[in-house]
Image: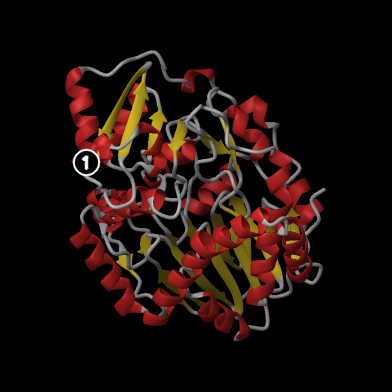
Amino acid sequence: MSWSFETLGNAIVQVSESGEPMLVTDPWLLGSAYFGSWELERPLTEAQLANARRSRFVWFSHGHPDHFHMGSIETIPRNVQMLLPDHYDDELNRTLTEAGFTPRVLPSKTWVTLSPGLRVMSVSNENMDAILAIDAGGTLLLNKNDSPFCGEDRFFRRLVSQFQRSYLFALCAFDADMINTYDGAMRSLLGPAEEAKPGTVWSAARIAQYLGVQNFCCSSSQHVYARPDSAWANDFRITWPDMQRYWTADDIRLIPPFSQVELPGGRLVRTDCDDVAPPESRIRPDAADNWAERLTAEEWVKVERFARQFETLRDWQDFIGFNVGGEARRFFLRAEAERKPQAKQVGVVFHVPRAPLLETVEYGYFDDLLIGNFMKTQLFNMKLYPIFTPRVAKLGGNAKVFTAADLRRFQAHYFRASPLAFLRYRAQLAFRYHIEPRIRGWSQAIGLFPLLKYLKRRVLGAPRTS
Protein backbone atom coordinates (compact mmCIF):
# COMPACT_ATOMS: atom_id res chain seq x y z
CA MET A 1 0.00 0.00 0.00
CA SER A 2 1.12 3.57 -0.64
CA TRP A 3 0.04 6.64 1.27
CA SER A 4 -0.21 10.29 0.30
CA PHE A 5 -1.65 13.52 1.57
CA GLU A 6 -2.98 16.64 -0.10
CA THR A 7 -3.47 20.09 1.41
CA LEU A 8 -6.66 21.58 0.01
CA GLY A 9 -6.61 24.98 1.67
CA ASN A 10 -7.19 26.38 5.16
CA ALA A 11 -7.13 23.40 7.55
CA ILE A 12 -8.08 20.65 5.08
CA VAL A 13 -5.67 17.72 4.91
CA GLN A 14 -6.73 14.82 2.68
CA VAL A 15 -5.03 11.51 3.49
CA SER A 16 -5.30 8.73 0.90
CA GLU A 17 -4.22 5.11 0.57
CA SER A 18 -3.28 3.99 -2.96
CA GLY A 19 -5.37 6.84 -4.34
CA GLU A 20 -8.43 6.06 -2.21
CA PRO A 21 -9.48 8.88 0.16
CA MET A 22 -9.35 7.66 3.76
CA LEU A 23 -9.33 10.65 6.11
CA VAL A 24 -10.03 14.36 5.70
CA THR A 25 -9.64 17.01 8.39
CA ASP A 26 -11.76 20.12 9.01
CA PRO A 27 -13.48 20.06 5.61
CA TRP A 28 -14.51 23.62 4.71
CA LEU A 29 -15.34 22.73 1.13
CA LEU A 30 -17.44 25.59 -0.17
CA GLY A 31 -19.09 28.89 0.71
CA SER A 32 -17.93 31.48 3.21
CA ALA A 33 -17.33 31.80 6.96
CA TYR A 34 -17.53 34.52 9.60
CA PHE A 35 -20.59 36.31 8.21
CA GLY A 36 -19.25 36.22 4.66
CA SER A 37 -15.90 37.71 5.64
CA TRP A 38 -13.75 34.66 4.79
CA GLU A 39 -13.66 32.63 1.60
CA LEU A 40 -11.28 29.89 0.54
CA GLU A 41 -8.18 31.25 -1.14
CA ARG A 42 -8.45 28.62 -3.86
CA PRO A 43 -11.78 26.86 -4.55
CA LEU A 44 -11.59 23.06 -4.57
CA THR A 45 -11.79 21.17 -7.83
CA GLU A 46 -14.62 18.71 -8.48
CA ALA A 47 -12.21 15.80 -7.93
CA GLN A 48 -11.01 17.24 -4.62
CA LEU A 49 -14.61 17.80 -3.48
CA ALA A 50 -15.54 14.24 -4.42
CA ASN A 51 -12.54 12.78 -2.56
CA ALA A 52 -13.27 14.77 0.59
CA ARG A 53 -16.92 13.68 0.60
CA ARG A 54 -16.19 10.01 0.06
CA SER A 55 -13.41 9.79 2.64
CA ARG A 56 -14.13 7.03 5.14
CA PHE A 57 -13.30 9.27 8.11
CA VAL A 58 -13.72 12.99 8.78
CA TRP A 59 -12.09 14.71 11.76
CA PHE A 60 -13.06 18.07 13.21
CA SER A 61 -10.71 19.96 15.52
CA HIS A 62 -13.10 22.56 16.95
CA GLY A 63 -16.22 24.59 16.34
CA HIS A 64 -14.97 27.61 14.36
CA PRO A 65 -16.88 27.81 11.07
CA ASP A 66 -13.74 27.51 8.93
CA HIS A 67 -13.13 24.15 10.65
CA PHE A 68 -16.67 22.97 11.44
CA HIS A 69 -18.47 24.34 8.39
CA MET A 70 -22.13 23.32 8.42
CA GLY A 71 -22.70 24.09 4.74
CA SER A 72 -19.94 21.62 3.87
CA ILE A 73 -20.98 19.05 6.46
CA GLU A 74 -24.46 18.89 4.95
CA THR A 75 -22.96 17.66 1.63
CA ILE A 76 -21.19 14.67 3.24
CA PRO A 77 -22.89 11.22 3.13
CA ARG A 78 -24.37 10.20 6.46
CA ASN A 79 -22.53 6.86 6.54
CA VAL A 80 -19.14 8.59 6.82
CA GLN A 81 -17.52 8.16 10.25
CA MET A 82 -17.22 11.54 11.96
CA LEU A 83 -14.34 11.77 14.47
CA LEU A 84 -14.33 14.33 17.28
CA PRO A 85 -11.96 15.36 20.07
CA ASP A 86 -13.03 14.78 23.66
CA HIS A 87 -13.94 18.43 24.32
CA TYR A 88 -15.27 19.77 27.62
CA ASP A 89 -18.63 20.54 25.99
CA ASP A 90 -20.08 18.02 23.53
CA GLU A 91 -21.92 20.48 21.28
CA LEU A 92 -20.16 19.27 18.12
CA ASN A 93 -21.30 15.73 18.94
CA ARG A 94 -24.89 16.88 19.44
CA THR A 95 -24.88 18.93 16.25
CA LEU A 96 -23.63 16.06 14.11
CA THR A 97 -26.03 13.61 15.72
CA GLU A 98 -28.94 15.92 14.99
CA ALA A 99 -27.72 16.15 11.38
CA GLY A 100 -28.00 12.37 11.01
CA PHE A 101 -24.41 11.26 11.63
CA THR A 102 -23.08 8.83 14.25
CA PRO A 103 -20.01 10.65 15.61
CA ARG A 104 -17.17 8.93 17.41
CA VAL A 105 -15.44 10.82 20.22
CA LEU A 106 -11.75 9.93 20.38
CA PRO A 107 -10.17 9.56 23.82
CA SER A 108 -7.42 12.10 24.30
CA LYS A 109 -3.79 10.98 23.96
CA THR A 110 -4.75 7.48 22.80
CA TRP A 111 -3.87 5.88 19.47
CA VAL A 112 -6.97 4.65 17.63
CA THR A 113 -6.58 2.37 14.61
CA LEU A 114 -8.90 3.34 11.75
CA SER A 115 -7.69 0.84 9.15
CA PRO A 116 -4.55 -1.22 8.46
CA GLY A 117 -1.68 1.26 8.30
CA LEU A 118 -3.73 4.22 9.52
CA ARG A 119 -4.13 5.29 13.12
CA VAL A 120 -4.83 8.63 14.80
CA MET A 121 -4.37 10.28 18.18
CA SER A 122 -6.49 13.27 19.16
CA VAL A 123 -5.29 15.63 21.91
CA SER A 124 -7.94 18.09 23.08
CA ASN A 125 -7.11 21.16 25.15
CA GLU A 126 -8.58 23.99 27.22
CA ASN A 127 -8.59 26.35 24.24
CA MET A 128 -11.50 24.18 23.11
CA ASP A 129 -9.32 23.13 20.19
CA ALA A 130 -7.47 19.91 19.42
CA ILE A 131 -4.37 18.56 17.69
CA LEU A 132 -4.48 15.37 15.63
CA ALA A 133 -1.53 13.02 15.17
CA ILE A 134 -1.92 10.83 12.08
CA ASP A 135 0.24 7.75 11.54
CA ALA A 136 -0.06 7.01 7.81
CA GLY A 137 2.03 3.96 6.98
CA GLY A 138 4.70 4.90 9.51
CA THR A 139 4.90 8.61 8.66
CA LEU A 140 3.69 11.11 11.26
CA LEU A 141 1.39 13.89 10.08
CA LEU A 142 0.99 16.24 13.05
CA ASN A 143 -2.05 18.41 12.38
CA LYS A 144 -1.72 21.30 14.83
CA ASN A 145 -4.01 23.51 12.68
CA ASP A 146 -4.49 26.77 14.66
CA SER A 147 -4.40 25.23 18.11
CA PRO A 148 -1.98 26.24 20.87
CA PHE A 149 -0.12 23.44 22.65
CA CYS A 150 -1.63 24.45 26.02
CA GLY A 151 1.36 23.10 27.92
CA GLU A 152 1.71 19.87 25.92
CA ASP A 153 4.81 21.03 24.01
CA ARG A 154 7.03 18.30 25.43
CA PHE A 155 4.46 15.59 24.83
CA PHE A 156 4.38 16.37 21.11
CA ARG A 157 8.15 16.66 20.94
CA ARG A 158 8.47 13.15 22.37
CA LEU A 159 5.82 11.94 19.94
CA VAL A 160 7.70 13.33 16.94
CA SER A 161 10.92 11.68 18.14
CA GLN A 162 9.26 8.27 17.76
CA PHE A 163 8.98 8.67 13.97
CA GLN A 164 11.72 8.80 11.35
CA ARG A 165 9.54 10.88 9.00
CA SER A 166 7.27 13.69 10.15
CA TYR A 167 5.24 16.62 8.83
CA LEU A 168 3.80 19.54 10.80
CA PHE A 169 0.60 21.25 9.64
CA ALA A 170 0.26 24.51 11.57
CA LEU A 171 -1.02 28.06 11.46
CA CYS A 172 1.33 30.69 10.07
CA ALA A 173 -0.76 33.86 10.27
CA PHE A 174 -1.57 36.72 12.61
CA ASP A 175 -4.82 37.84 10.99
CA ALA A 176 -6.83 34.78 12.10
CA ASP A 177 -7.88 36.74 15.19
CA MET A 178 -9.15 40.24 15.98
CA ILE A 179 -6.57 42.69 14.58
CA ASN A 180 -9.01 45.53 13.82
CA THR A 181 -8.33 47.27 17.15
CA TYR A 182 -8.35 50.92 18.24
CA ASP A 183 -7.59 52.94 21.34
CA GLY A 184 -10.07 55.13 23.21
CA ALA A 185 -9.60 57.95 20.69
CA MET A 186 -10.27 55.54 17.78
CA ARG A 187 -6.66 55.52 16.64
CA SER A 188 -5.68 52.23 15.05
CA LEU A 189 -3.45 49.98 17.17
CA LEU A 190 -2.44 47.91 14.14
CA GLY A 191 1.03 48.48 12.77
CA PRO A 192 2.16 48.11 9.14
CA ALA A 193 1.44 44.72 7.57
CA GLU A 194 5.08 43.99 6.77
CA GLU A 195 6.15 44.64 10.35
CA ALA A 196 4.65 41.46 11.81
CA LYS A 197 5.23 39.04 8.92
CA PRO A 198 8.90 38.12 9.56
CA GLY A 199 8.31 37.33 13.23
CA THR A 200 5.18 35.31 12.49
CA VAL A 201 6.94 33.09 9.95
CA TRP A 202 9.95 32.76 12.25
CA SER A 203 7.69 31.65 15.13
CA ALA A 204 6.25 28.87 12.95
CA ALA A 205 9.76 27.79 11.95
CA ARG A 206 10.88 27.80 15.57
CA ILE A 207 7.96 25.57 16.61
CA ALA A 208 8.87 23.14 13.83
CA GLN A 209 12.49 23.09 14.98
CA TYR A 210 11.51 22.57 18.60
CA LEU A 211 9.34 19.59 17.69
CA GLY A 212 12.03 18.10 15.45
CA VAL A 213 9.88 17.59 12.34
CA GLN A 214 11.44 17.37 8.88
CA ASN A 215 8.66 19.13 6.94
CA PHE A 216 6.29 22.08 7.49
CA CYS A 217 2.95 22.74 5.79
CA CYS A 218 1.14 26.03 6.44
CA SER A 219 -2.37 25.27 7.75
CA SER A 220 -5.49 27.19 8.76
CA SER A 221 -4.18 30.19 6.85
CA GLN A 222 -5.36 29.95 3.22
CA HIS A 223 -8.36 32.28 3.27
CA VAL A 224 -9.16 35.63 1.68
CA TYR A 225 -11.33 38.47 2.98
CA ALA A 226 -14.40 38.86 0.78
CA ARG A 227 -16.50 41.47 2.60
CA PRO A 228 -15.96 45.07 1.42
CA ASP A 229 -15.54 46.11 5.08
CA SER A 230 -12.91 43.45 5.83
CA ALA A 231 -11.05 43.43 2.48
CA TRP A 232 -8.42 45.76 3.99
CA ALA A 233 -7.16 42.77 6.01
CA ASN A 234 -6.02 40.96 2.84
CA ASP A 235 -2.80 42.99 3.07
CA PHE A 236 -2.11 41.30 6.43
CA ARG A 237 -2.34 37.74 5.12
CA ILE A 238 0.92 35.78 4.99
CA THR A 239 1.28 34.40 1.49
CA TRP A 240 3.48 31.66 0.03
CA PRO A 241 6.06 34.24 -1.14
CA ASP A 242 6.11 35.64 2.42
CA MET A 243 6.75 32.14 3.78
CA GLN A 244 9.62 31.58 1.36
CA ARG A 245 11.11 34.99 2.08
CA TYR A 246 11.10 34.79 5.89
CA TRP A 247 11.48 31.05 6.59
CA THR A 248 14.47 30.60 8.89
CA ALA A 249 14.62 26.81 9.39
CA ASP A 250 16.89 25.75 6.53
CA ASP A 251 16.93 22.17 7.82
CA ILE A 252 13.14 21.84 7.56
CA ARG A 253 11.49 21.51 4.14
CA LEU A 254 8.75 24.03 3.46
CA ILE A 255 5.87 22.41 1.58
CA PRO A 256 3.90 24.79 -0.70
CA PRO A 257 0.17 25.14 -0.01
CA PHE A 258 -2.26 23.24 -2.23
CA SER A 259 0.21 20.38 -2.70
CA GLN A 260 0.03 16.60 -2.99
CA VAL A 261 2.85 14.61 -1.38
CA GLU A 262 3.65 10.90 -1.66
CA LEU A 263 4.61 8.96 1.47
CA PRO A 264 6.96 7.77 2.77
CA GLY A 265 9.48 9.31 0.36
CA GLY A 266 7.97 12.80 0.40
CA ARG A 267 7.91 13.32 -3.38
CA LEU A 268 5.96 16.45 -4.30
CA VAL A 269 3.47 15.16 -6.84
CA ARG A 270 1.71 18.42 -7.60
CA THR A 271 1.38 21.95 -6.32
CA ASP A 272 -1.23 24.48 -7.32
CA CYS A 273 0.01 27.30 -5.11
CA ASP A 274 0.50 29.60 -8.11
CA ASP A 275 -3.00 28.96 -9.43
CA VAL A 276 -4.65 31.42 -7.04
CA ALA A 277 -6.67 34.49 -8.02
CA PRO A 278 -5.72 37.83 -6.40
CA PRO A 279 -7.71 38.59 -3.22
CA GLU A 280 -9.31 41.72 -4.65
CA SER A 281 -11.05 39.58 -7.29
CA ARG A 282 -12.88 37.68 -4.54
CA ILE A 283 -14.53 40.69 -2.85
CA ARG A 284 -18.33 40.31 -2.83
CA PRO A 285 -20.32 43.55 -2.48
CA ASP A 286 -23.40 41.48 -1.60
CA ALA A 287 -21.66 40.32 1.61
CA ALA A 288 -21.84 43.85 3.09
CA ASP A 289 -24.15 44.68 5.99
CA ASN A 290 -26.02 47.92 6.53
CA TRP A 291 -23.91 49.74 9.12
CA ALA A 292 -26.60 52.40 9.54
CA GLU A 293 -29.21 49.98 10.88
CA ARG A 294 -30.06 50.51 14.55
CA LEU A 295 -31.23 48.10 17.20
CA THR A 296 -34.75 48.23 18.57
CA ALA A 297 -35.31 48.61 22.30
CA GLU A 298 -36.09 44.89 22.55
CA GLU A 299 -32.91 44.00 20.69
CA TRP A 300 -30.82 46.17 23.01
CA VAL A 301 -32.24 44.18 25.92
CA LYS A 302 -31.02 40.96 24.30
CA VAL A 303 -27.57 42.45 23.68
CA GLU A 304 -27.34 43.62 27.29
CA ARG A 305 -28.35 40.20 28.58
CA PHE A 306 -25.69 38.63 26.37
CA ALA A 307 -22.97 40.99 27.66
CA ARG A 308 -23.83 40.60 31.33
CA GLN A 309 -23.75 36.79 31.30
CA PHE A 310 -19.92 36.76 31.28
CA GLU A 311 -19.47 36.89 35.03
CA THR A 312 -15.88 35.66 34.74
CA LEU A 313 -14.92 39.14 33.47
CA ARG A 314 -16.16 41.07 36.50
CA ASP A 315 -12.85 41.08 38.37
CA TRP A 316 -10.94 42.20 35.29
CA GLN A 317 -12.90 44.86 33.45
CA ASP A 318 -15.67 47.37 34.07
CA PHE A 319 -17.85 47.35 30.96
CA ILE A 320 -18.67 45.85 27.57
CA GLY A 321 -20.11 48.30 25.05
CA PHE A 322 -21.54 48.27 21.55
CA ASN A 323 -21.94 50.94 18.90
CA VAL A 324 -24.61 49.94 16.38
CA GLY A 325 -25.78 52.34 13.70
CA GLY A 326 -24.16 55.23 15.55
CA GLU A 327 -25.96 54.47 18.82
CA ALA A 328 -23.56 53.48 21.61
CA ARG A 329 -24.33 51.82 24.94
CA ARG A 330 -22.11 50.52 27.71
CA PHE A 331 -23.09 47.73 30.04
CA PHE A 332 -21.23 47.81 33.35
CA LEU A 333 -20.38 44.45 34.88
CA ARG A 334 -20.35 45.72 38.47
CA ALA A 335 -22.42 48.50 40.02
CA GLU A 336 -19.40 50.29 41.48
CA ALA A 337 -17.58 50.28 38.11
CA GLU A 338 -19.90 52.94 36.71
CA ARG A 339 -18.82 55.33 39.49
CA LYS A 340 -15.14 55.17 38.56
CA PRO A 341 -13.66 58.19 36.73
CA GLN A 342 -14.25 57.61 33.03
CA ALA A 343 -10.54 57.93 32.21
CA LYS A 344 -9.81 54.98 34.51
CA GLN A 345 -12.60 52.69 33.40
CA VAL A 346 -11.49 49.41 31.84
CA GLY A 347 -13.58 48.11 29.00
CA VAL A 348 -14.23 47.58 25.33
CA VAL A 349 -16.68 48.96 22.76
CA PHE A 350 -17.46 46.98 19.63
CA HIS A 351 -18.48 48.94 16.53
CA VAL A 352 -20.53 46.37 14.65
CA PRO A 353 -23.44 46.08 12.18
CA ARG A 354 -26.81 45.07 13.55
CA ALA A 355 -27.40 41.79 11.66
CA PRO A 356 -24.23 39.85 12.60
CA LEU A 357 -24.41 41.11 16.18
CA LEU A 358 -27.95 39.77 16.62
CA GLU A 359 -26.96 36.42 15.09
CA THR A 360 -24.04 36.25 17.51
CA VAL A 361 -26.31 37.05 20.46
CA GLU A 362 -28.68 34.28 19.37
CA TYR A 363 -26.05 31.55 18.91
CA GLY A 364 -23.45 32.73 21.42
CA TYR A 365 -20.22 32.54 19.38
CA PHE A 366 -18.53 35.91 19.79
CA ASP A 367 -15.31 34.65 18.21
CA ASP A 368 -17.06 34.72 14.84
CA LEU A 369 -17.30 38.51 15.09
CA LEU A 370 -13.73 38.92 16.31
CA ILE A 371 -12.17 36.76 13.61
CA GLY A 372 -14.20 38.30 10.78
CA ASN A 373 -12.28 41.59 11.21
CA PHE A 374 -15.06 43.78 9.82
CA MET A 375 -16.08 44.76 13.36
CA LYS A 376 -13.97 47.49 14.98
CA THR A 377 -12.80 46.89 18.55
CA GLN A 378 -12.16 49.97 20.70
CA LEU A 379 -10.09 49.26 23.81
CA PHE A 380 -10.10 51.39 26.97
CA ASN A 381 -7.17 50.66 29.32
CA MET A 382 -7.16 46.97 28.39
CA LYS A 383 -6.14 44.32 25.86
CA LEU A 384 -8.14 41.39 24.51
CA TYR A 385 -5.63 38.88 25.90
CA PRO A 386 -5.17 37.09 28.21
CA ILE A 387 -8.67 37.50 29.69
CA PHE A 388 -11.39 38.81 27.37
CA THR A 389 -11.03 36.69 24.23
CA PRO A 390 -10.33 33.39 26.03
CA ARG A 391 -13.17 33.82 28.53
CA VAL A 392 -15.79 35.24 26.16
CA ALA A 393 -14.96 33.63 22.83
CA LYS A 394 -13.39 30.30 23.83
CA LEU A 395 -14.91 29.46 27.20
CA GLY A 396 -18.23 31.24 26.85
CA GLY A 397 -19.01 30.31 23.27
CA ASN A 398 -17.49 26.85 23.05
CA ALA A 399 -17.46 25.52 26.62
CA LYS A 400 -20.55 27.31 28.04
CA VAL A 401 -18.48 28.69 30.92
CA PHE A 402 -20.01 31.91 32.27
CA THR A 403 -19.73 31.97 36.07
CA ALA A 404 -16.88 31.62 38.54
CA ALA A 405 -18.19 28.19 39.50
CA ASP A 406 -18.27 27.18 35.81
CA LEU A 407 -14.67 28.33 35.46
CA ARG A 408 -13.51 26.32 38.49
CA ARG A 409 -15.12 23.16 37.11
CA PHE A 410 -13.60 23.80 33.68
CA GLN A 411 -10.10 24.32 35.08
CA ALA A 412 -10.40 21.30 37.37
CA HIS A 413 -11.34 19.17 34.37
CA TYR A 414 -8.16 20.06 32.48
CA PHE A 415 -5.98 19.90 35.58
CA ARG A 416 -7.11 16.33 36.19
CA ALA A 417 -6.51 15.46 32.53
CA SER A 418 -2.87 16.61 32.59
CA PRO A 419 -1.63 18.38 35.74
CA LEU A 420 1.87 19.15 34.44
CA ALA A 421 0.59 20.55 31.15
CA PHE A 422 -2.00 22.63 33.02
CA LEU A 423 0.64 24.20 35.29
CA ARG A 424 3.16 24.62 32.48
CA TYR A 425 0.59 26.47 30.36
CA ARG A 426 -0.18 28.87 33.20
CA ALA A 427 3.49 29.57 33.66
CA GLN A 428 3.83 30.27 29.94
CA LEU A 429 0.83 32.63 30.00
CA ALA A 430 2.15 34.42 33.09
CA PHE A 431 5.51 35.02 31.42
CA ARG A 432 3.97 36.17 28.13
CA TYR A 433 1.32 38.51 29.49
CA HIS A 434 2.70 39.64 32.87
CA ILE A 435 6.44 39.13 33.33
CA GLU A 436 7.60 39.93 29.79
CA PRO A 437 5.58 43.20 29.56
CA ARG A 438 7.04 44.33 32.91
CA ILE A 439 10.56 43.59 31.72
CA ARG A 440 9.79 45.52 28.54
CA GLY A 441 8.45 48.49 30.51
CA TRP A 442 11.40 48.50 32.88
CA SER A 443 13.96 48.30 30.07
CA GLN A 444 12.22 51.08 28.14
CA ALA A 445 12.24 53.30 31.22
CA ILE A 446 16.01 53.03 31.59
CA GLY A 447 16.79 53.01 27.86
CA LEU A 448 17.92 49.38 27.56
CA PHE A 449 14.99 48.03 25.55
CA PRO A 450 16.66 48.24 22.08
CA LEU A 451 19.74 46.40 23.36
CA LEU A 452 17.76 43.68 25.16
CA LYS A 453 15.52 43.21 22.12
CA TYR A 454 18.56 42.87 19.86
CA LEU A 455 20.21 40.33 22.18
CA LYS A 456 17.03 38.30 22.52
CA ARG A 457 16.56 38.10 18.75
CA ARG A 458 20.20 37.09 18.27
CA VAL A 459 19.95 34.33 20.90
CA LEU A 460 16.67 32.99 19.50
CA GLY A 461 17.74 33.34 15.87
CA ALA A 462 14.90 35.67 14.91
CA PRO A 463 15.06 37.38 11.50
CA ARG A 464 16.06 40.99 11.26
CA THR A 465 13.25 43.49 10.69
CA SER A 466 14.76 46.76 9.62
Left/right of residue 40 with respect to residue 247 in the rendered view:
left
Q: Quadrant of residue 83?
A: bottom left
Report which residue position mark 1 lands on: 336
Query: Looking at the image, which residue is at 77% across and 61% down?
Result: 451
Query: Looking at the image, which residue is at 21% across and 59% down?
Result: 404
Query: Looking at the image, which residue is at 45% across and 33% down?
Result: 378
Left/right of residue 404 with respect to residue 214 in the rendered view:
left
Left/right of residue 257 with respect to residue 27 in the rendered view:
right
* Residues packed near mark 1 inside 10 Å, few (<14), some (14 to 19) or many (20 plus): few
Q: Quadrant of residue 239?
A: top right
Q: Quadrant of residue 395?
A: bottom left
Q: Is residue 323 above or below residue 117?
A: above
Answer whether residue 267 is visible to the viewer in this image: no
Residue 277 in the image: state x and y as whole percent.
70, 33
Answer whether residue 45 is visible to the viewer in this image: yes
Residue 152 in the image: state x and y as whole percent.
48, 75
Residue 70 in the image: state x and y as whole percent.
37, 43
Query: Label 1 is placed on what type of residue?
Result: Glu
Q: Nearer the viewer, residue 391 or 160?
A: 391
Pick the quarter of the image with the N terminus.
bottom right
Q: Nearer the viewer, residue 382 or 446?
A: 446
Left/right of residue 208 with respect to residue 14 in the rendered view:
right
Describe the element under mark 1 as helix, strand or loop.
Answer: helix
Q: Is residue 376 above or below residue 447?
A: above
